[in-house]
Each structure stands twice: as C-alpha cells, then as structure tokens.
Image (cartoon, rainbow, N blue to C red):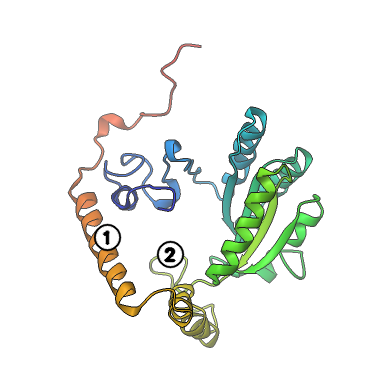
Amino acid sequence: MAKGVPLSKLYGDFMGTVEGTTKGLGAGIVHSADPELGVLGQAGTIGSQLGICVGTAYSSKFQGTDQVTVVYFGDGAASREPLHGSLNWAGLYNLPVIYICENNEYAISCHVSETHSVKEHIADWAEGYGIPNCVVDGNDVVLMHEAMKEAVERARNGGGPTFIEAQTFRHRGHFEGDPYNYVDPNVLKDWVENRDPIKNYVVQLLDEGMCSEEELATIDHRVDQEIQEAIKKAEEAPLPGAERIYEGLFSKEVL
C-alpha cells in the first residue's frame, strides 16, 4: 500500500481473482508483487525473500542508483539458513539493503527461545557479519520511522546494510482456526490493550496537537469507503481460467 499498490489488487490476491497483482495465479498476500512499483514479492518457501534481496541490492550498487532494498521477515524465517547466507553477502559487498525482522516471538506456535541460539536479540547475529543493527519497539510508529530513516540514509551514502529487529506481538493466531492457546492470555491482553501501534499513535497525534478528532474521523470514514470499494471490485472479478495453469512456468524467449 505504501508503495502505491491499489487496495483492490491486494484483496484480489486474498481472493485469488484476476484483479490481484498476480491475476489469480498466486493467491495470498505473501505472493503479491508489482515490479513496476518495486514490490517484488517472494516464493512460498519461508525465507526465500532473503536471497532475492541481496540480488536486488547488488543490482542497485552495480548500476549506481540510489535505490535501497527493504526485506521483511519474521523470527521464524530468521531461524533458517537463508538469513545467514544473505547477511554474509550483504556485509561482504556492502550492499544497500535493510533487514527488518518482525519479531512477534512465535513462529506459528514455537517461541523464539525454542528456535534461536542467541540469548538476547536476533539482531545480535548481524554483529558477526559486521552489519550495523538495532532493536526497536516495532509498535512505536515514530521510533520505527526514525530507525528506517537512519538506515536508508546509511545505505544511500554508501554505508551498506542495516539490520532492524522490530519487537512486536501477534494479536491473533498464525492462521484462521489457530486456537492461539499457546500464548499467555494476560500477555496477549497487555499487547492488545496497551501496545496497539495505531491506538497509541492516535493518542500521540492528539496530545501533540497534530490533528483533531474530527480530522481523524474523516480519515477513518474515507479509508472504510476505500476498503469496501476495493473488496467489491475484487469479489466481482472472475477466477483465472484453467487455460492459464502453465502461465509463467516457461520463458517465451528463445535463448
């Protein structure tokens, strides 16, 4: 959304209709992609984007552009091998890439303490590859903005990669039907009631006089309308036909 992908395209991906960014061939938000807007998507294998990101970052450096690659992944993906190969390559070639590990403490139902050898923070692994890193409250909008701004400036000024561990917590289970009974209900309640990033940022905006409640209500109403229109457009679009089942598997170019 921040890169400009229309909402109807994202809902089309949710529903697997031709309105989606992949026109129904990659159902699910994880497969959304719009190369023209710089959204490259990923394969279904967890952590695959960690290999893609060093390729795009190397391309930017090779061509001398000011483009910066940003790659998102969870604490679960961080426990897999692709992360270390990617960090090594990024550190070795001083690539303009920003790693954002969204640490919500659980990879489906496994707690981070059961899947990581590091005792403090996942970001500690970046130290071994000579990569600047930080641990940020991922639910604080302003802190995340500041961390990202610093990382982007570093990358564009030739300072290479940055690893940001954004600490957060899932408000719901990993998938529809997940009972989420492996989480302490009191911990979950605290995150939902006291650490919701949107609610807290609204309070901050109002306390600092950045906007009024009426202005925020107007924004909420406009967004609700946009969402309903996007859902309607995605729902009304057809599903892909069977004749497209092999689309994208083979190159049409003769090498």
Residue 228 vs 119, above or below: the answer is above
Q: Position of residue 215 (x, y in %)?
A: 32, 73
Q: Is 5 left, or right, of 8 in this rendering? A: right
Between circles 1 and 2, the one closer to the viewer is: 1
Residue at the spot of label 1: 227
Taking the view exactly as shown, the residue that stands out farthest to the left is 236
Q: Quadrant of residue 138?
A: bottom right
Q: Position of residue 48 (x, y in %)?
A: 58, 44
Residue 97 visible in rendering: yes
Q: Residue at x 46, y 70 (%)?
A: 173
Residue 65 vs 135, above or below: the answer is above
Distance of label 1 from label 2 (alpha carbons): 22 Å
Residue at the spot of label 2: 175
- Which amino acid, mark 2? Phe
Q: Is 67 left, or right, of 244 in this rendering? A: right
Q: Observer-nearest residue: 160 or 249? A: 160
Q: Quadrant of residue 147?
A: bottom right
Q: Position of residue 248 (x, y in %)?
A: 40, 29
Q: Position of residue 23 (x, y in %)?
A: 31, 39
